[in-house]
Image: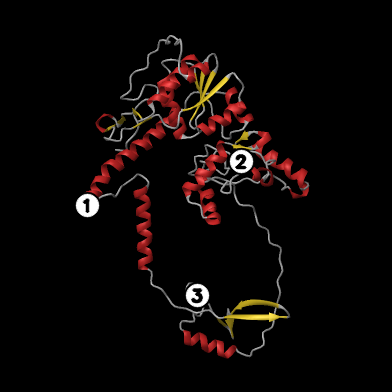
């Protein structure tokens, strides 16, 4: 049977006290967050960096605070999943997060409304759900807002169109978390007994290891074949170029993988051909010229961004995502203030928002002229398996050119 997350997100998670529906009496003197939140709306995000950026976009009607990531999770000391009862998760408050939850409750108690502004993905939705469950006992006016770029316009647009928490996303995150726990906690001890201590199994890593092993077996089974190619360095006037022998006297030479090609198998065969060619006159028989058009690559997804950063910069996947997170959450651009420079960086889509396409068209027309524009915007199709929940990774504004933002960036950004 496939494990499913059966805990209904509308109810408090198992292991947590049921929320009290009566409004709590405002405290005469709360913590520092409570004093700041009086008669204002409270906006909750995950990180202090994101909070600082949003504070610069919002007026005095809002207070912005950070939850410092997840506040609840499965316990580390035990499985934390009731397998016999529909795979029900048993969440607990993460160690060290109780003081943060207490301050958030004090702030929510005094707020006119609470807006959950966590990241627009499964993890962000789960964080909002856990926070909503914890804060609803002191403030029932809780809404979810979603934006895919941290700019003033995007944030204000999100506040103008709040929504409810997407329980499908919450259940998706919960199912993945339960599977992570079941695979890791059930299979890792088996590895310790059967292979050696210190090894671990995982929902993703074990499949990845299997793919690596299968590929290694293919490499080990490969039978190498020796073959030779003949190259000649030729010169005309001052121009030197290299040519490869592809045929002679009706015989076509090539690699073993080329159908119908004669393969030069040994060094002796290669040297015999080279000897026969020494002193020969080489003539350019034909010159072919053609225009070559290169289409731009599709916009970045998370995986293609990581691949390109590794190929060009030698960055690991973790380093790439860390830098991308910084660019998404906001960079201080001096007079312009702190602003997010790229859209949300966890995406499998190559779709670009129409507003961004229009901005790019206007920029190209003004900067280079209309002749540099295609007849119609170029559209790339995402893979069939793509969730397409967020658009591709792109700059939040084409007007913030590399030369303009470079003085404000670190070398790795």
Describe the element under mark 2 as helix, strand or loop: loop
Q: Which residue is mark 3?
A: 255
Front-lying residue, 221 or 46? 46
Going 26% across and 29% down the picture, which residue do you hit? 85
Q: Is residue 1 above or below residue 166?
A: below
The dot on residue 194 is 1
Task: Categorize mark 2 by other alpha carbons within 10 Å: few (<14), some (14-19), many (20+).
Answer: some
> CA separation, marks 1 and 3?
45 Å
Q: Is residue 56 above or below residue 199?
A: above
Point out the tag, 1 or 3, that comes first from the N-terminus.
Answer: 1
Describe the element under mark 1 as helix, strand or loop: helix
- 6 displayed left or right of 252: left
Q: Which residue is mark 2?
A: 352
Q: Do the residues under discs 3 and 2 have CB atoms within 8 angstroms?
A: no
Point out the tag, 3 or 2, that comes first from the N-terminus.
Answer: 3
Front-lying residue, 30 or 231? 30
- Observer-side mark, 2 or 1, equals 1
Going 51% across and 76% down the picture, which residue do you hit? 260
The quadrant of the rendering that contains the N terminus is top left
Point out the tag, 2 or 1, that comes first from the N-terminus.
Answer: 1
Q: How far from the left and from the top, in percent, is residue 233?
A: 62, 80
Task: Categorize mark 1 by other alpha carbons within 10 Å: few (<14), some (14-19), many (20+).
Answer: few
Quarter of the image for residue 50 reads top right
- 274 displayed left or right of 368: left
Going 43% across and 15% down the picture, which residue do you hit? 138
> CA separation, marks 2 and 1?
49 Å
Front-lying residue, 268 or 52? 52
> CA separation, marks 3 and 2?
43 Å
Q: How far from the left and from the top, in percent, is residue 86?
A: 29, 30
How many marks are shown on the rendered structure?
3
Q: How far from the left and from the top, in percent, is residue 141?
A: 49, 16
The dot on residue 76 is none
């Amino acid at each position: 049977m496939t494990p499913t997350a059966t805990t209904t997100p509308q109810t408090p998670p198992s292991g947590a006290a049921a929320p009290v529906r009566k409004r709590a009496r405002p405290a005469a003197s709360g913590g520092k967050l409570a004093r700041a939140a009086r008669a204002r709306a409270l906006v909750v995000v995950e990180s202090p960096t994101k909070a600082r950026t949003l504070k610069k976009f919002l007026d005095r009607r809002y207070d912005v605070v950070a939850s410092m990531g997840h506040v609840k999770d499965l316990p580390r000391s035990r499985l934390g999943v009731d397998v016999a009862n529909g795979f029900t998760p048993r969440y607990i408050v993460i160690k060290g997060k109780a003081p943060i939850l207490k301050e958030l409750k004090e702030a929510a108690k005094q707020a006119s409304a609470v807006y959950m502004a966590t990241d627009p993905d499964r993890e962000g939705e789960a964080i909002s759900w856990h926070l909503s469950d914890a804060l609803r006992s002191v403030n029932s006016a809780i809404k979810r807002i979603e934006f895919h770029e941290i700019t003033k316009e995007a944030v204000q647009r999100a506040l103008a169109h709040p929504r409810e928490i997407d329980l499908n996303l919450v259940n998706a995150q919960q199912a993945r978390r339960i599977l992570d726990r079941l695979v890791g906690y059930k299979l890792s001890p088996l590895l310790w007994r059967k292979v050696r201590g210190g090894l671990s199994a995982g929902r993703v890593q074990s499949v990845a290891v299997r793919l690596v092993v299968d590929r290694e077996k293919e490499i080990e089974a490969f039978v190498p074949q020796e073959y030779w190619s003949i190259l000649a360095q030729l010169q005309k006037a001052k121009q030197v170029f290299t040519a490869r022998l592809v045929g002679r006297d009706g015989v076509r030479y090539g690699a073993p993988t080329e159908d119908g090609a004669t393969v030069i198998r040994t060094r002796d065969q290669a040297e015999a051909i080279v000897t026969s060619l020494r002193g020969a006159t080489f003539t350019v028989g034909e010159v072919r010229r053609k225009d070559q058009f290169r289409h731009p690559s599709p916009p970045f997804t998370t995986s293609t961004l990581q691949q390109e950063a590794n190929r060009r910069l030698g960055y690991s996947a973790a380093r790439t995502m860390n830098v991308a997170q910084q660019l998404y959450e906001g960079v201080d651009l001096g007079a312009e203030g702190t602003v997010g420079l790229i859209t949300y960086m966890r995406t499998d889509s190559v779709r670009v928002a129409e507003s961004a396409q229009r901005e790019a068209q206007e920029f190209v027309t003004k900067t280079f002229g209309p002749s540099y524009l295609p007849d119609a915007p170029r559209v790339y199709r995402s893979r069939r398996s793509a969730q397409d929940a967020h658009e591709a990774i792109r700059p939040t504004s084409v007007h913030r050119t590399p030369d303009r933002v470079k003085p404000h960036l670190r070398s790795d950004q």
